[in-house]
């Protein structure tokens, strides 16, 4: 690599939504964690400031999970991370890989809670351990306020670990003198050191780590928190009356506690639910086989089924929250492709990294082409300007294709969701039919359409609905032959719980079976205006993923060679609508 501009590329990227902020924070930690002190510049200082901003937006628990997926080797980054929050500090101390000289310079400047966590590592050299001992045993605990006695609960579980959902208040802890705490801590530390010296293959948590370590090799600390684990199958959670997760069993509670999936006002949150589940929550009704989308570590990320029962207090029947169970949906195997997303897989991360590496040179090519085409570096012959404009257009088309590929992967692995909201689908169709005139008029394609005279409010944000619908309609129009006749009609499903858009496929697409209909095409010669980089089949597959993430569907009714295509959109609210159509 001649010029390493990865950091500048990340800083120039606008992090959109929760998933975008997660990705950018992880990229910054990874890049800064590999930067030696001699290579530190003002850009790295700006990256630290961006990390501070992202930490405030994501929260300490989510940021700790992201830090736990990296391996910081920069003392400057570690010193900064330990000041952001207790969980982030714990993850940074557990994952940092520094030399002895770096630890010796860093340890005296660490906060007390960070030094206390560092003592539990078993891969530190004797000089570092001696320095920690020299700093004193008070690093293990926070001192009590002046004039008050410190208190502990002898049977209390470690912080952040859920044992059960209590129904009664725990007994009041007994007061213990401060010097008693120090004695207890010293005894615990002596016991651990003696145990490890007798059995070096035993992990610091009292059990061997999963896998097959080398003989005599001790497992890394905090391995149960930072290791990449298989996706969980069942999770029990508890919600309070506001719909915020307050407890979780089956995974580390820090991955879920604090998220509010029923808060419709925060569509970019790491947890969200489908409209039907949201309606049941607002009505305080039981939830059966609802859908909840989680974003985060691979252990919890993806689409889940949720079954929940409302809880009411004994005094007056006041609503107190939900007790729920999350379960992974079955992997779809039928031809009609159930409305579930495959489980996350490591291949998605590899593809994301590949696309990031491809964007860098293409962005550079596009920038130079625009400089030539606009004559910003001096007069240029018209022939070269024409070639530069063509190159810039091709680069923009490739970048748009990369964004579509990344969006499809994130939707199908459940790592991103469709922004909820309310949109008038009838108004969007009416406007887009007029916008398609430049594509249909010159080729004499007749597009007949019919929509209800009243509004059709669907549960999708306006931008999301317009993007999905434009992608589908432009795909059908560009695939149609000159003079072909197409039609679309907007109607309502049984009970008016969903809006249904019926379309006729162009003959070139109607002759394909289902597998071929949703497969990428080989596009030669640039394709028609409006056609995506990977052709009609990929565009239809992306539309399908977007609709399913929103609670709708895209499928072909009837036989595999049916010329019809059905789109269903979840209505914002079940309503009785006027079926008098406006047609053209």
Image (cartoon, rainbow, N blue to C red):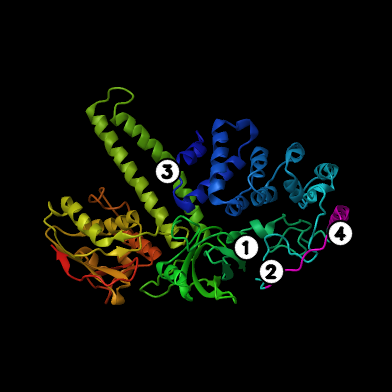
Comes first in the chain, label 3 or label 4: 4
Q: Quadrant of the C terminus?
A: bottom left
Q: Which residue is mark 4?
A: 191
Camera-near label (3 vs 1) is: 1
Magenta stretch: includes residue 383: no
Residue at coordinates 40% horizontally, 39% vertically from top-left?
363
Q: Which residue is mark 2?
A: 163
Few, some or many residues within 10 Å of mark 2 (<14, 14–19, 20+)? few
Query: What is the magenta segment's predominant secondary structure?
Result: helix
Comes first in the chain, label 1 or label 2: 2
Comes first in the chain, label 4 or label 2: 2
* Rendered location of residue 130, percent (x, y): 84, 43
Contact between marks 3 and 4 (CB within 8 A): the answer is no
* Rendered location of residue 349, percent (x, y): 51, 54
Q: Which residues are magenta?
A: 168-192
Residue at coordinates 27% horizontally, 25% vertically from top-left?
380
Asked if residue 520 shows in the view, the reply is no
Q: Which residue is mark 1?
A: 253
Q: In front: 75, or 355?
A: 75
């Amino acid at each position: 690599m001649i010029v390493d501009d990865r950091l500048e590329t990340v800083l120039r990227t606008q992090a959109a939504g929760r998933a975008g902020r997660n990705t950018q924070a992880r990229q910054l930690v990874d890049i800064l964690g590999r930067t030696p002190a001699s290579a530190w510049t003002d850009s790295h200082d700006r990256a630290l400031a961006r990390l501070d901003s992202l930490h405030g937006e994501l929260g300490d628990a989510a940021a700790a999970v992201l830090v736990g997926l990296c391996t910081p080797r920069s003392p400057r980054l570690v010193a900064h991370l330990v000041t952001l929050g207790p969980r982030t500090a714990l993850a940074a101390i557990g994952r940092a890989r520094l030399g002895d000289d770096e630890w010796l310079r860093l340890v005296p400047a660490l906060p007390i809670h960070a030094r206390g966590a560092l003592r539990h590592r078993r891969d530190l050299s004797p000089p570092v351990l001696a320095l920690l001992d020299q700093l004193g045993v008070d690093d293990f605990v926070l001192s009590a306020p002046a004039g008050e006695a410190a208190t502990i609960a002898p049977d209390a579980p470690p912080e952040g670990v859920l044992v059960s959902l209590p129904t009664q208040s725990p007994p009041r802890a007994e007061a213990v003198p401060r010097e008693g705490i120090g004695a207890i801590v010293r005894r615990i530390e002596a016991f651990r050191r003696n145990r490890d010296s007798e059995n070096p293959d035993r992990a610091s948590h009292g059990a061997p780590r999963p896998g097959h370590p080398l003989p005599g090799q001790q497992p890394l600390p905090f391995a149960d928190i930072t290791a990449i684990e298989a996706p969980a199958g069942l999770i029990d959670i508890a919600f309070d009356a506001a719909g915020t997760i307050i407890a979780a069993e089956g995974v580390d509670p820090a991955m879920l506690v604090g998220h509010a999936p029923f808060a419709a006002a925060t569509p970019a949150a790491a947890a969200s639910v489908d409209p039907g589940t949201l309606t049941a929550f607002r009505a305080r009704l039981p939830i059966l086989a609802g859908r909840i989308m989680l974003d985060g570590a691979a252990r919890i990320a993806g689409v889940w089924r949720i079954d929940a029962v409302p809880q009411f207090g004994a005094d007056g029947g006041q609503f107190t929250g939900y007790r729920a169970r999350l379960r992974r949906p079955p992997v779809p195997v039928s031809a009609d492709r159930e409305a579930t997303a495959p489980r996350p897989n490591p291949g998605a991360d590899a593809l994301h990294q590949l696309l990031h590496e491809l964007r860098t040179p293409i962005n550079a090519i596009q920038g130079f082409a625009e400089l030539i085409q606009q004559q910003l570096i001096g007069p240029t012959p018209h022939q070269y300007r024409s070639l530069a404009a063509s190159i810039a257009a091709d680069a923009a088309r490739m970048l748009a294709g990369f964004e579509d590929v990344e969006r499809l992967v994130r939707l199908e692995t459940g790592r991103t969701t469709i922004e909820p909201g309310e949109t008038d689908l009838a108004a969007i169709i009416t406007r887009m039919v007029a916008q398609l005139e430049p594509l249909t008029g010159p080729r004499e394609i007749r597009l007949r359409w019919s929509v209800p005279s009243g509004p059709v409010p669907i549960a999708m944000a306006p931008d999301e609905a317009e993007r999905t619908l434009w992608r589908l309609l432009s795909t059908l129009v560009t695939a149609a032959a000159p003079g072909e006749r197409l039609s679309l009609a907007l109607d309502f499903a049984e009970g008016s719980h969903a809006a249904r858009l019926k379309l006729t496929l162009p003959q070139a697409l109607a002759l394909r079976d289902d597998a071929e209909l949703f497969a990428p095409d080989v596009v030669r010669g640039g394709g028609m205006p409006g056609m995506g980089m990977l052709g009609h089949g990929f565009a239809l597959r992306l539309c399908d993923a977007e609709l399913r993430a929103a609670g709708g569907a895209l499928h072909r009714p009837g036989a595999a060679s049916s010329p019809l295509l059905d789109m269903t959109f979840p209505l914002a609210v079940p309503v009785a609508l006027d079926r008098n159509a406006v047609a053209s």
